Amino acid sequence: MNGRSVKAIMWAGVGALAMTGALLVATSAWAGPDRTRAEVAVALLPTATVSSTLSYQGQLLSGGNPVNGTPVITFSVYAQSSGGMPLWSQAMNVTVNKGLFTAQLQVDPRLYDGRALWLGVTVAGESEMTPRQPLLPAPYALSLRPGAIMSATLSDDPIFRVINTGDGHAIWGSSNTGYPTVYGENGGVGPAVLGHSISGTGVSGQGFEGLRGQGTSTGVFGEGMVGVRGQSRDGIGVSGSSTNNFGVLGESITGTAGFFTSLQDTGVWANSANGHAIKTNRPALIAGPNPKQIALLRWYPAIATTTTLSVGAGPVGVAFDGANIWVANLGNSSVSVLRANDGSHVMTPTVGTYPVALAYDGINMWVVNKGVTTGSVHVLRASDGVLVKNIDVGLGPWGIAFDGINMWVVNESSDSVSVLRASDGSHIITPTVGDSPAGIAFDGINMWVVNSNSGTV
């Protein structure tokens, strides 16, 4: 068996292009008198599903003479032309007739990632034959290597189309750098990247920037039951930026052009240095709590008759949460919650000593407790009055205001203001004010503090 050698007639890599191109080139070399060209062409027709199988044909010689039989041959794929450990191996009984054989190698498809590979052949009982054979692609398969560019001028069809008839992803991209994994560029008017799904998501992005689009016209365009959906665990769901046009544009014929919701923070946050933060060209109704535009919450005719409702002793503070009116009763250290549409009593949540003022942040009601020796703020969930947290502030707190992010509490006895982050209650700053601050209000940019003893604001 010594002196045995394999003369490779041809090999074919994965993909329809690689198999068809390589096999047709090699047909005249190995068809021989026993097989006509037509028979070979029929044998080389690809199956309905293109697989990662590598078809290997060769001639096995022993001492220069063709071999007959069914020897065990091991095929191995390496990342080196010599030495090293195989990345994949497969041993099989191969039928050899007059030295000629064909082997179907079930190579792990994950090895075809663009790196150089070599195939080693070993007949049972002998050393691996040398040299190893490089696995070379068909020319057009080079367009699918990492970093390759596919370029064409097409009017109707995409340059690259991936279709998955199952439930998984058509394209999956992952990057550990700041560069894109999937990048599309179109010099015409069509989309650079188009994702289509029958009942799922057309394009889904995850990461620091889940989905980013850039263009002179539309950066990201979504069409479907949900045009564009942004979801983030800790960051921004959808971010839009434009120098001269719309950062985010929503259009709808009969539905909602834009819908924003948040469980812990702000559903919509708008800011503008010189223009409008939010601008509408039609009458707009903001549904839901909005502390900065509280008048928009109730657009109905005034009740013609006066109604008198009973609350606790010495009521001094009042606030509205969009559905209920909260009244702070200094005399008996209680809060009365009344339904705004009919005045019925909803609940009487537990608060601190001598509640004097209230403010609503969109989720929770903040109740200022003047106390006996120290002041505090009780944060209550507006939906059911459950205590969320209790925060210590200065001495003799008397007023509170919300700026959309932070709660400002004026402490009359300690001549200070406690600024608390609404999302977690942490203390932010203690700005300097005048003597005995007793009232406070926010104008959208600045906070106004009334100092009762010094007669200043």
Image (tube, helix red, strand yellow):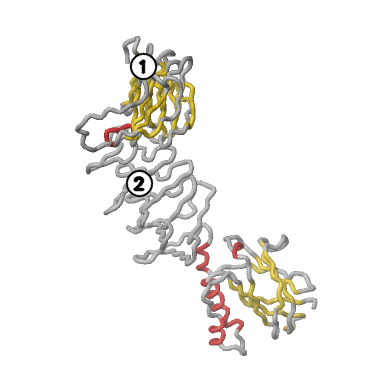
Q: Quadrant of residue 86 in the image?
A: bottom right
Cβ atoms under marks 2 and 1 closer than 8 Å: no
Residue at (40% x, 59% y) in the render = 194
Q: Amino acid at mark 1?
A: Ala
Residue 313 pos. (x, y %):
37, 21
Give the SS element for disc 1: strand
The residue carrying mark 2 is: 259
Q: Nearer the viewer, mark 2 or mark 1?
A: 1
Taking the spot 60% from the left edge, 85% from the top edge, the residue there is: 31
Q: Residues within 10 Å of mark 1 (few under 14, many from 20)?
A: many
Q: Local crowd at mark 2 within 10 Å, few (<14), some, or many (≥20)?
A: few
CA gap between label 2 and label 1 equals 39 Å
Residue at horizontal 32%, vertical 16%?
Answer: 457
Looking at the image, tell me whether mark 2 or mark 1 is earlier in sequence order. Answer: 2
Specify whether residue 270 is in view. Answer: no
Drawn side of residue 408 relative to residue 340, left or right: right
Q: Nearer the viewer, residue 231 or 392?
A: 392
Callout 2 amino acid: Phe
Near-viewer residue (163 or 444): 444
In the figure, is residue 177 to the left or right of 354?
right
**Can you say whether 243 is above or below 136 in the image?**
above
The disc at residue 408 is: none
Q: Residue furthest left?
A: 304
Answer yes or no: is residue 176 visible: yes
- Residue 186: give x, y in percent of width and height: 38, 57
Q: Considering the image in quadrants, where does the N terminus appear?
A: bottom right
Secondary structure under badge 2? Answer: loop
Circle 1 residue: 438
Image side of residue 10 versus residue 332, left or right: right
Q: Where is residue 228 drawn, in percent x and y?
A: 38, 51
